[in-house]
Image: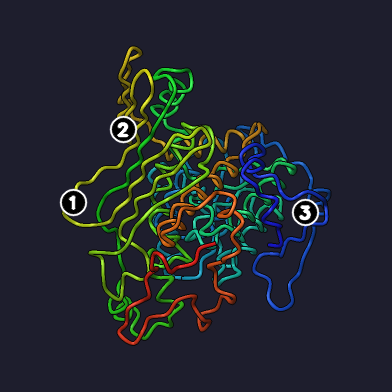
Amino acid sequence: MNIDPKEFSRRQFFKTTGAAAAGGSLLVPLAGCRGPEKTTTLATVATAAAATPVFAQHTDELKIALIGCGGRGTGACSQALNTEGPIKLIAMADVFRDRMDSALNTLKDEVAKHNKPERVDVPEENKFIGFDAYKKAIALADVVILATPPGFRPMQFEEAVNQGKNIFMEKPVAVDAPGVRKVLAAAKIAKEKNLKVGVGLQRHHQTGYIESLKRLHDGAIGDIVATRAYWNGNTPWCHTRAELEKQYGRKLTEMEYQMRNWYYFVWICGDHIVEQHIHNLDVINWIKGGHPVKARGNGGCETRKGPDYGEIFDHHVVEFEYPDGSVCFSQCRHQQGCWNEVAEYAIGTKGKAHFTDGSWRITGPQKWSSKTQTDKYQQEHDDLFAAIRNNTPYNEAEYGAHSTMTSIFGRMSTYSGKQLDWDEAIASNIETMPKVLAWDAETPTKPGPNGLYQLPVPGQTVTV
C-alpha cells in the first residue's frame, strides 16, 4: 500500500487513531491482484459507498461467510451463529479443502445441538478453495469472519471493506508495519461506509476487565506509574514436516509446509509476541489510553530448537515506554519447565491492580475484586451483531491495529536488539509477505542445508 510513512507520526497515530494520509488520491492496491498492480483511490471507494443497511433484530436474515476454517475460525463462526435473530452460514473459503470440510462438519453438529440446523447451509458452489477464494466468499455475505493466519488479514480486511461488508476479524490484524498501515487506512473507510467491525481482542467484552478498567480510569489506584504484562507458558501445537507428509502421503512444497505449520514463521504468524502476547499488551494500552513511544528488548531461542520450529524466538522481554514516561515490563515465553503466568499488573500512587483471565483485583484504599465469569468469546459476537442489526456505531479496527503494532514494535526491538521509537517502527517499509502466493512460489524464508531456518540475530537483524 502506497502510504507515506511520515503521515503516521506518533502524534497523529495517537490522536487520530489511524487516520489515513491526507488527500483523496491515495492509491490502494486491490488485494490479491495478479499481474500489473490495479489501484483505486480511497476517495473513490468512500464516495461510492452506500450506507450499511439496518437489519431488523428478529426478521432480517444475516448471511455469513467464513474465511479461514481452522480451529479459531470454526469457533468464531459457531459463536456468530449463536447470536440473536435469523442468521445463516452460506459461504466458506480456505486454501485447504480438508480444513474446510472439517469445519463445516463441526459447525453442522453445533447448530444441530441447538435445534437450528437451518443456520448452516453451504452449497458446493459456495465453497471456495485457493489464495484468492476469500474474494468470492466475501461477495456473497452480509458479514464476513476473517480467521485465516494473521499474515493474510490486511489484504482480506481491505477487500471486505471495499466490498462494503460488516466484519469480524481475529487478532492480530497484521504481522508487519505496512500491514498495520493498510488496516488503518481501510478502517477509516469502514467508518465512512458505516460498516461494523469487530476484532478478536475479547477482553474488551469481558465483565471483569470492563469494570476493572473503569475503576482504574476513575482513579482507583491513583496515577499509574508502571505496568507489567506476561504470557509465559509452554510451546503450543507444532505440525512436523514428517507428520504432515505421512498424513497426506506425499512431499509438501515449502509453501504448503509453512502454511500447515504457520505458527513458526514470521510472515504468516508474526511470532508469539504478536500472535499471543497481544492480548496482554492490548490491556496495557487500554490502561494507559494509547500506545507506547519507545521499545527496548531482548530475546532469542534457547530451548525450542529444530527444523519444525521455524524462525521465531521462544522468549521476548521488552520495556515499553509510554508518553507519560511510565514503563511496561513485558515478558512472553514458550519454554518447558519454567515459571508460567498470563496476567497484567498496574502499579499506581495509591494502590495496585492484578488481572488474570478470570480474576481481577485492586488493592489500596479503593480495594475491589471480582471473579465474575462470562463467555467473552460469545459476548464479542453478541455485541457486534447487535450493532449490525441496530445500526449503532461499532469499529474496533483502530485499537486492534494499535495493539497489533505494539506487539510488532516489541518484536522489532527484540529481533534487532535496538531501542526503537514508535515513529520509526510504524514507518518501516519492511514487508514480510511473499511477493507471490502460490503453492510453488518462493517463501520468505527457507531451511538451510541442515534443515534449520535462520533465526533473527540481535545486533545484526534489521527491522526498520
Drawn side of residue 117 relative to residue 437, left or right: left
Q: Residues within 10 Å of mark 2 (few under 14, many from 20)?
A: some
User: Which is nearer the eye, 337 or 91?
Assistant: 337
Q: Residue, x 29% and y 53% (percent of image)?
A: 333
Viewer-closest of 56 and 93: 93
- SS of the residue under disc 2: loop
Q: Give the residue at the far top of this rendering.
A: 365
Disc nearest the viewer among 1 and 3? 1
- Rendered position, 437 above or below 414: below
- Asked if the residues shown at circle 2 and circle 3 are in contact, with their CB atoms under 8 angstroms apart, the answer is no
Q: Earlier in the sequence, mark 2 or mark 3?
A: 3
| Image quarter of residue 129 | bottom right
Q: Which residue is mark 1?
A: 338
Q: Is residue 311 left or right of residue 171?
A: left
The disc label shown at residue 358, or none:
2
Horizontal and vertical percent for residue 449?
A: 34, 87
* Looking at the image, residue 73 lies above or below residue 254: above
Left-right relation of 146 to 345: right
Q: Residues within 10 Å of mark 1 (few under 14, many from 20)?
A: few
Residue 40: % across, % down: 79, 61
Q: Which secondary structure, mark 3?
A: helix
Q: Which mark is residue 169?
A: none
Type of the residue with mark 2: Gly
Instruction: Residue 183 in the image: state x and y as whole percent.
Output: 62, 52
Amino acid at the residue labelled 3:
Leu
Task: Specify whether residue 105 is in view.
Answer: no
Q: CA distance from mark 1 to mark 3?
A: 49 Å
Q: Which residue is mark 3?
A: 42
